[in-house]
Image (cartoon, rainbow, N blue to C red):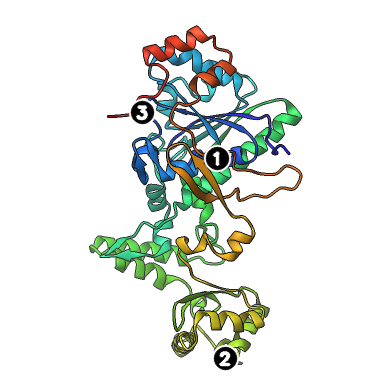
Amino acid sequence: MPGALNGIKVLEIAQVMAIPITGMLLSDLGADVVKLEPPWGDASRHTMQPVLPGESKSFAVLNRGKRSISLNLADERSRPALEALVRWADVVLVSAKASDLTSFHIAYDDLKQINRELIYLEHSGYGRKGPMAEQGGYDLTAGGLSGLMALIGKERNDMPIYTQPAVLDLTTGVLSALAVCAALLTKATTGEGQRVETSLLSTAMFAQANVAHDFPAVEPNFRKQFLADIAEAREKGAGYAELQSLRFGSVRRQSAGNIYYRYFRTKDSVISIGCLSPDLQRRFREALEIEDPRAEPGFDLQTDEGFERMKQFVKSTEALMQAKTTQEWIDLLLDHRVPATPVLFPEEAIDHEQVTANGYMVELMHELLGPYRTFAPPIRMDATPTEAQGPSPLLGKHTEEVLREAGLPDDAIAAMIESGAAGPKLPS
């Protein structure tokens, strides 16, 4: 059966991760996604786990199910091809700074003149407005600016550690696909296209929804005091680890004593425990045969004595968890209906029986890389099934095919390829 977006034509003018993920998800949903690459290809073909010239593992997994067309947008002779593609497309996905969009004449106002009903997704690092609008952005830089990197709290040698996976790229890709689907639904009822905007910075602020906020009416001094402490420490030349300790030390003591939603070392490895409801927390205590001091009448976490008792409570629970193996704890906790799983490495997880039972991995066959396994479409739909529509494309493989579908005559296509305005040219 066809997918939910069967018949929708998407032109992707984007590189690396965030918006290529959007294109991949739309392809999984049934859309015909054409990836427009420069003659030398998407940068991720060469820099993100490369295995062959012009082919990388990251490109292969994030660009499945697409067709590739190669155009040099800096060459005016490619313009007829671009305009034909814009007329052909229902959706255009673009990731670039505003000045680049203007320079290449691919801004929304430019393309809207070609296709009045176009849905145009514009992605940037930090948003279209403001003093950083013209700066390039990546997952790492947006994570640093937004506070997300500090929130993760990992550091080594007095420096923050960049963590994988690229959460902001992945989340932005999903949010952008959601936005495109909403715009398509609107177009189905109104007949009108529109511009849709996403950015890594907006995603980062969204991803910190439970911490990136300010409640001055109920916490008038909390944020103000923290900002003053941080400013003073920076002025004195404090290192990153010291700044981190200030941040986490200023968080309210209610966060102390966490034994219910965390990882524990066991006798042989590590286990994850998830108990967010009072009932689950009660069952966890029953399984471990422990009592939480916070349940005692008159207990006050805000006192030094109460705070110290909670620290000791956590230490004793940690010691208890090391008395059994991970599997022994899982068996016991599941008997008490407490969510618990082992902590695995990705190399182990792809063969886990639960992953296999649900078909969460899929095998694809690449022309050069051979068979490879990657994640299956993360969304399942009964009436309009999702499907990985094939492996990632070779650079420019579908240039002639797609341009013909867009209405260009063969002689015009041949002339573009001969001139170098179209067709791949891998760096030597």
* Residue 336 % position (x, y): 66, 83
Earlier in the chain: of badge 2 and badge 1, it is 1
**Can residue 254 be spotted in the picture?**
yes
Q: Are marks 3 and 1 in contact (CB under 8 Å)?
A: no
Disc number placed over residue 40 in the picture, else none? 3
Query: Upstream in the sequence, badge 3 or badge 1?
Result: 1
Q: Is residue 312 above or below residue 240?
A: below
Picture quadrant where residue 180 is located: top right
Q: Secondary structure at mark 2?
A: loop
Three-letter residue code for mark 2: Ile
> Where in the figure is residue 326, as x and y percent of width and height?
51, 79
Q: Nearer the viewer, residue 291 or 243?
A: 291
Q: Are marks 2 and 3 in contact (CB under 8 Å)?
A: no
> Quick one: 79 or 195, which is closer to the camera?
79
Q: Residue furthest left?
A: 237
Q: Is residue 17 visible?
A: no
| Residue assigned mark 2 | 290
Q: What residue lies at 70% left-to-right and 29% top-to-bottom?
A: 187
- In which quadrant is the C terminus drawn? top left
The residue at 47%/49% (across/down) is 168
